[in-house]
Image (spheres, rainbow, N blue to C red):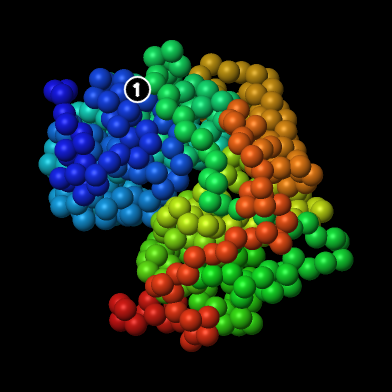
Amino acid sequence: MTEVNFSQVLKEKFGFSQFREGQLEILESLSKQQDTLAILPTGSGKSLIYQMYGFTSNQRVLIVTPLLSLIQDQIGRLQLLGEKKVTELSSRQTLPEQERVLNNLQKFQFIFTSPETLQKDNVRQALKTVGIGLLVIDEAHCIVQWGKSFRPDYLKLGEVRKYLGKPTTLMLTATASKKTRAGILKYMNLDSGNVNEFITSVDRPNIYLGFKIFDPSESKLDYLLELLPTLPSGGIIYFSSRKAANQVSDLISNQLGLRVAPYHAGMSNYERHQIQSQFANNRLDLICATSAFGMGIDKDNIRYVVHFHMPGDIESYVQEIGRAGRDGQPSAAIMLYQLGDEKVPSLLNNFSIPSEEMIDQYFEGNNQGSSDRNLVQFYQQNGLKADQIKNLFQQQHLQKKDELAEMLHLVNEKGCHRQYLLQHFDQEFNQHDDNCCGGMEHLPTFPKNENADSKVFKMIDWQEKINSLFN
């Protein structure tokens, strides 16, 4: 790749006068065909890196993302930059639509897809034929966090990379501990000694870390309904289940009159896209989301994130609170915890690991499809026997228990929550003050959202609005 004036391209193509932390260094690494793992905060401009690489190198860029909503968002952003040579290969497409893209793949420079789509022989063959200059794994922590449970095709991305001729690879995520970073490289079949790592701090000083611990006799829901009217427009509440997200969304709408909608995998792509658009344009005050789909929400001025249910590990917590305050303004992450809340992530952890009985059935020839069986198949194809696979999953189970214990420690920390959080990532902590973390009495003074309506508003029925737009 010839020498490029990246700063000039940044100004002329993107309209920015200077790079954000890490962007230029990562671009220079990629321009030397160096595989790169980058840990950059949410909202730090990760997508600009591979966009600029594509524009300046004229090489084809393949971007693997975990959610369809992320694919739609990134395609839209490239189109706003005037890029027409962008497409997707995903489950959103009908077979004829996908065939048309595959037959014309040489016309596209930016191709977005998912780990599951990359398991199709015709897709891999077409990508190999046209050639990939840069392979991007967006939200790369999903390789470790999701690949070992309900999306085992993430563990096969290393094989896909090899099949495509080992193109230069960029792995992007906002949070990854040392152990997670090692796992990403392991499953991508990359040697850490040959990978450039750019690691920025996970600390977001503008986000106050608030923790509220409830007695068994207290109601978290009642507290939430009292809290929300005191918060500005622009929030996310995380739940562990679709049912809870739906129910609490209805309660907030009916009792508080706030403009609210649920956002989770049980909704159609069409519904989620419309809700995301309304939220981004300040026509919804908050959304009630499951954690996996909170990742698809793109809005700079989210003022608060509430965890109604706790996540199962610190890395997930940091990922989720990272949705707030991307504009740099004062924001809050609020954890509502009651003794026993840890049972939900504990159960989810148990369900995410194949049972010994299922492993025995698999090796006895009962190989009917499921994510569990696909996961066992992955390890079996990599030379592991039944007992070795059982031992591996037992180790994973113990690791998840340890991660949950660390999350509980963070919630119940008597000292500085932020200091404990940063220690998890082997990062330095400066100084504690009232704006850092603690109880609910030190929530920040939020900036006024000039685009938001008054707190007295007519509730929008989002379902009705969708129908009015398209009927």
| Direction from residue 405 to residue 271 in the image, left or right | left
Residue that appears at 30% across and 39% down: 19
On the image, the x and y values in percent for residue 393 come to: 66, 28
Query: Can see residue 417?
Result: yes
| Direction from residue 419 to residue 380 in the image, left or right | left
Q: Amino acid at mark 1?
A: Asp
| Quarter of the rendering occupied by the C terminus | bottom left
Q: Categorize mark 1 by other alpha carbons within 10 Å: few (<14), some (14-19), many (20+).
A: many
Q: Vertically, is 2 above or below 136?
A: above
Query: Can see residue 120?
Result: no
On the image, the x and y values in percent for residue 71 come to: 34, 50
| Secondary structure found at label 1 | loop
Residue that appears at 66% across and 47% down: 433
The foreground one among 163 and 424 is 424
What residue is disc 1 on?
A: 35
The foreground one among 284 and 108 is 284
